[in-house]
Each structure stands twice: as structure tokens, then as C-alpha cells.
Image (tube, rainbow, N blue to C red):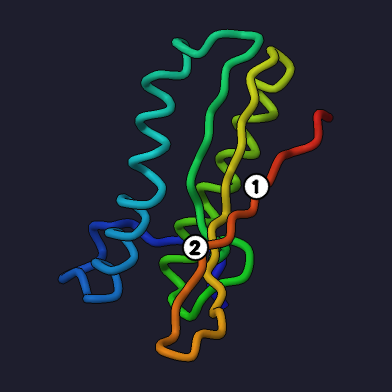
């Protein structure tokens, strides 16, 4: 059973799994969090808008655990940010993009679909 981490100094050599997960979390989550935290005081209330681009993988997973987990972390950060900034009139939105195959006689194509997740005002 896994319910907690371990001290980083106990790891002798980072594994490929560690690199894959840390890269995804840094690229997809931490980069957005650090930028938002650096600029959060610049957003005007009321009427300010913060929009995160996420993925449907945050809600459903798409076969790569590290990618979906990094997008889910961003989604939950968005939710927490909304609880803090929403009462001040700042809108926080997470967009979850997905793909859908369409029928075409010549070649398969993908069409982008967008899904916006807005949190309730409570």
C-alpha cells in the first residue's frame, strides 16, 4: 500500500519513471502554478480572468498516468484558486481539451473539442 512519499535523499539513482513523472509535473503543473502565483496580485477584482488549458486526461486518464495526474493536479489547483479568488470577483476557469475522430472518406482526421469546467460560486 502506498499512502505517502519518501525522502528524496533515500533514492540512489533516479529511475526513468521518476524522470517521466517529474518532467510531466514540472511542465504541465508547476510551470502554470509558479506563473500564476507570481502574477496573482496583478489580476483586477472584480472582472479578472484566469484560464488554464488542461486536458480531458485530468478527468478520465488517457493511458499515461503521469500526464493525466499532472493535468488533474492543475485542475485541483484551479479549484483551490477559485475558492480563494472567486469571492473577490475573479473568474478562474480550466479548459479540458479532447479529440474526436470524424468520418472522412480520404483519411482519418481529428477534430478538437473544448470543455470548460467552471466551479460553483460556493
| Structural crowding at the residue carrying mark 2, measured as other residues with C-alpha within 10 Å and reported as few (<14), some (14–19) or many (≥20) | many
The quarter holding residue 30 reads top left
Q: Nearer the viewer, residue 41 or 21?
A: 41
**Residue at left offset 54%, top offset 79%:** 101
Q: Is residue 35 left or right of residue 101?
A: left
Q: Position of residue 55 (x, y in %)?
A: 52, 59
Residue 51 in the figure: left or right of residue 11 = right
Q: Residue 122 location, x and y as percent?
A: 83, 30
Can you name the residue that lies furthest to the left here? 13
How many other residues sit within 10 Å of disc 1, few (<14), some (14-19) or many (≥20)? some
The tag on residue 59 is none
In the rendered view, tell whether residue 91 sits above or below residue 24.
above
Closer to the chain start, of discs 2 and 1, is 2
Q: Which residue is mark 1?
A: 116
Please, is residue 98 above or below residue 84 in the view? below
Left or right, 79 with respect to 58, comes to right
Quadrant where the image shows the N terminus: bottom right
Closer to us: 104 or 74 = 104
Circle 1 SS class:
strand
User: Which residue lies under the disc numbered 2?
Assistant: 69
- For the point 50% across and 13% down, the residue is 43
Residue at the spot x=33%, y=41% of the render?
31
- Foreground residue among 44 and 17: 44
Name the residue: 51% across, 47% down: 74
Amino acid at each position: 500500500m502506498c499512502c505517502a512519499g519518501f525522502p528524496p535523499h533515500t533514492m540512489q539513482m533516479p529511475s526513468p519513471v521518476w524522470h517521466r513523472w517529474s518532467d510531466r509535473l514540472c511542465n504541465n503543473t508547476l510551470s502554470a502554478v509558479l506563473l500564476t502565483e507570481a502574477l496573482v496580485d496583478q489580476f483586477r477584482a472584480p472582472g479578472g480572468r484566469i484560464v488554464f488549458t488542461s486536458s480531458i486526461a485530468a478527468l478520465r486518464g488517457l493511458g499515461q498516468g503521469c500526464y493525466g495526474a499532472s493535468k488533474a493536479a492543475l485542475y485541483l489547483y484551479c479549484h483551490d484558486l477559485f475558492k480563494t479568488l472567486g469571492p473577490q470577483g475573479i473568474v478562474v476557469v480550466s479548459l479540458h481539451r479532447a479529440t474526436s475522430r470524424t468520418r472522412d472518406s480520404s483519411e482519418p482526421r481529428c477534430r478538437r473539442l473544448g470543455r470548460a469546467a467552471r466551479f460553483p460560486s460556493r
